[in-house]
Amino acid sequence: MKKDKNKLVLGILTLCILVVWTVGAVIGFNQEKQDLENEPSGTYSITQEPDKPDSVIPTKDSSFIKGVDLSTIIALEDAQAVFKDKDDKEEDIFNILKDAGINYIRIRIWNNPYDEKGNSFGGGDCDLDNAKEIGIRATKAGMRVMVDFHYSDYWADPEKQYAPKEWENYTEEEKETAVYTFTYDSLKEIIDAGVDVGLVQIGNETNGSMCGEGGLFGEEWDLSTGVGQMMKSGCKAIDDINGKYDREILKVLHFTDLVTNGEWYAKCVNQLGIDYDVFATSFYPMWHGDVKDMTKALSNIAKTYDKKVLVVETGYPYTYVNFDSVNNNIGDESGMVHKDYEVSQEGQSQAVHEVMMGIDKVNETIPGYGLGTFYWEPAWISAKGFGSTWENIALFDKDGKAMESLYTFGGYENKE
């Protein structure tokens, strides 16, 4: 009888254990399911460790662009500029950038940046040969390339959009043909050299003007007086390159002053029927304002016009100090329209981080449409005989050592 009683007790205990285990498993499953259901929509999600610095860009998509514009690098190296990683070890800059998490290099192309005697206009001698050399090095280092056509012999931006000297007397129709030919031939030469091109930009900061046409030249600002047609020609050249090489290079249009008039330009492009893939913007927090407004505008463009969006230029100063005899773009507080971050290395890191987060937040609204960010000329420090107006906004210090802000880009790369 005692033996039977012991068996009964043992059976009851076993049953209780099974019940407790089952209830616990159900509760755990339901909690896990609830956690997944409560997870924000979009392309990313991470769990932040309590005391971990907030320097991780939370994206699981390896195609998210963490890029830099490196157009002046050959001229800098010719001027004996030396670059070092954060441990003060001298290294090839492409290796430094790759190790820091950079996966894309942007390169501008000017048609003929030399005078009649062959003297360079400066700014990095950004001709086709320069672009090829940089592109080859970037590709060998495992990074993709964005080509930025200015369709000018020198800087093109909202204040100046001059036609190349060889095109100055062209009609609008002749410029359309010239844009197509220059785009197609240049890309063919770059790709034939083995460069991994993923993005091509048709014009630079083309706010109503490009290549001697549009608002700056007494015409309309809505891209309807020649500018839109040239954009179509450039896009057609990329389509034909894609067909020839079986590529999927994305066609990019670039504007600035996003918060003020970005959505208006997106509307103008749509009305003109330009077949492109990516609406790109410059966004410098010290000049253009709150990142939240950037995210809102880009999200609206992505939703309204079904276009991917991209920040192709950003930057922020880490000091007001001038290290050479060339006046900097920002020499003191008067150059700062907005002061949302400290002018320090920490403030620079925070600005970089928040711009990247801002473009990535577009993916919460329309997944896969916020492509990423490019930092403009992070290596343009002062070198021998080669001054810089950007040295205090670079991501390398005056001695060429990579600062912590550069490594903000790669925070999540190995966490996928």
Image (cartoon, grey):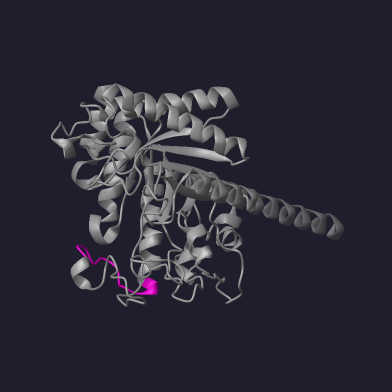
- Give the residue at x 84% y 54%: 4
In the image: residue 215, left or right of residue 163: left
Residue 243: image quadrant is top right
- Provide residue 62's location: percent of width, then percent of height: 56, 46
Q: Is residue 160 above or below residue 263?
A: below
Q: Is residue 383 magenta?
A: no
Query: Where's the N terminus, which quadrant?
Result: bottom right
Q: Nearer the viewer, residue 360 or 68?
A: 68
The extreme left residue here reads: 218
Q: Nearer the viewer, residue 234 or 146?
A: 234
- Provide residue 275's location: percent of width, then percent of height: 37, 24
- Provide residue 17's location: percent of width, then percent of height: 69, 55
Q: Nearer the viewer, residue 164 or 262?
A: 164
- Give the residue at x 39% y 50%: 117
Q: Is residue 267 above or below residue 139?
A: above
- Provide residue 52's location: percent of width, then percent of height: 49, 69
The image shows a total of numbered marks equal to: 0
**Taking the image as drawn, is residue 226 in sight?**
yes
| Main SS category, magenta section | loop
In the image: residue 196, left or right of residue 399: right
Residue 392: image quadrant is bottom left
Question: Magenta segment range?
Answer: 336-346
**Taking the image as drawn, is residue 143 in sight?**
no
- Give the residue at x 23% y 73%: 332
Q: Is residue 180 above or below residue 165?
A: above
